[in-house]
Amino acid sequence: MRVTAPQLEQADDHDQIQIKGNDLRGVKPNLCTTAAFHCKPSLLFWCTYLYDTLRPRLIYEGNIDSLCELVDILKVEVLGEQLSRQGESVAGLRPILQRILADVHERLAFCARTHIREEIANFRPSDEDLDYPGKLERSVDTTSSANVGDNADIYVTWYRPLEKIVSCLSKLYCCLEPSVFTGLAQEAVEVCSTSLQNASKVISKKATPMDGQLFLIKHLLILREQIAPFDIEFSVTHKELDFSHLLELEKSLKATCEEFIMSITKLVVDPMLSFVTKVTAVKVALSSGSQGQKLDSILAKPLKTRAFASPDKVAELVQKVSTAIQQDLPKVMIKMRLYLQNPSTRMILFKPIK
C-alpha cells in the first residue's frame, strides 16, 4: 500500500519515527522514546513510507562495504538492540525492518557475484602482477629493514585475485545467510583457483617451471588456510598438506605438489635415468632368453664391458648426480624458502625428494 503526503500529514503525532542519515553508509533508525508507539492503522502508513523511501536507494547501491555496514546496522543496532530495548512499543516495526534487511541481503549477494565475475574471473593481470619471483624478492629486501610482523607486507606478495577473494569473503561471512554464503564461497574458490592456475602457466613460461609450480602451491595453500575459519562445507581443520578432502581445491593442490616433487627428483637423478633404462633393457633381454647364438654371445658380455656402462662412464654419471645434489638441491631449497615461509610445509614437500 503506497502512502501519499496528505495521508502522512494526518497521522497521529505520537506515531512518529525519525530516520537519521542521508546515505546508506550512515542510515540508522533512531526510535522515538518520548511516546509509546502504538500499533494503530497509521503504523502501516509509516512502515510503508519507510520501505518505499529506502528500497530505491538499496537497489542502486553497488558498494559491498556500504551494504555490509547496513546489514550490521540493521541486524545488530536496530533489530538486535533498539527494538529489543524498547519492547512492544515498537514491535510493529520489526516486519518492515526485516523486509528491508532481506532486500539488503539480496542486493549484497548480487553485488558479490558481480564482483567475483568482474574482478576475479575476468581479471587481466599486468606484467607487475605476474612478476614472480621478483615480487617476493623485493618483499624480502623490504621486510629485512622493516618490521617483519607487518601484515601489509604479506598481502603485497599475494596475487591480486586471491587478495580480492579473501577480502570479499571476510566481509560477506557475517552478513549473509549461511546457505547463501556457502554458495558464493564455493563459486569464489573455484574461480580463484582457475585464475591461479592460469597465472601459474604464464609464470612458468616467463620465469621457470619451478617458479610456476611454487607460485601455485603457495597461493592454493593461502586460499585453503584463509577459508578454513569459515564454517562452510569445504573448510578444513589442518593447515598443512592434508589431502583427505576430495574437493577441486585439494585436488589441484595435491596434483601441483606431486608435479613439483617429480620435477625436482628428475632434476637430480636425470643423468642416471638413461643409464637405468639401458640396464633394465639388458636385464629384460637376458631374462627372456634368445635363440640366436650371436645374440647369446652379445648378451653374455659383462655389463661393465658395454660402452654406456664402462668405468669411465659410470664415474662421470656419479659425478653428475653428486654435482646436482650439492649444487642444484640447495638452489631448490632457497627457492622454496622464498615461496613457502612455513618450514613444516617445505619439509613435507622435500621429504619425498630425499
Image (cartoon, rainbow, N blue to C red):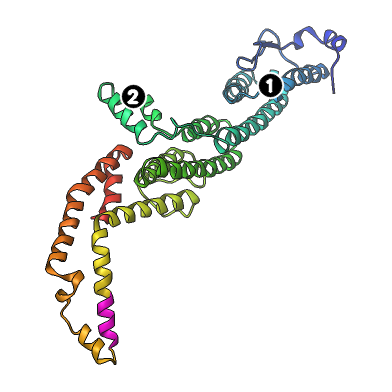
Q: Which mark is residue 169?
A: none
- Residue 122 lies left or right of residue 301; in this view the side is right
Q: Which numbered disc flags the more N-terminal residue, 2 or 1?
A: 1
Look at label 2 and name its amino acid.
Answer: Asp
Tell me which corner region of the image, top left, top right, bottom left or bottom right, holds residue 298: bottom left
Look at label 1 and name its amino acid.
Answer: Glu
* Residue matched to label 1: 88
Range drawn in magenta: 281-289
* Residue 293 on the magenta segment: no
State the residue in front, 133 or 186: 133
Q: Which mark is residue 150?
A: 2
Position of residue 293 measured from the top left corner of the image (x, y, whole percent): 24, 92
* Residue 282 on the magenta segment: yes
Would you place residue 240 above or below residue 45 in this image?
A: below
Q: Residues within 10 Å of mark 2 (few under 14, many from 20)?
A: few
Q: Kindly give the residue lying farthest to the front in the view shown.
A: 294
The image quadrant where one finds the N terminus is top right
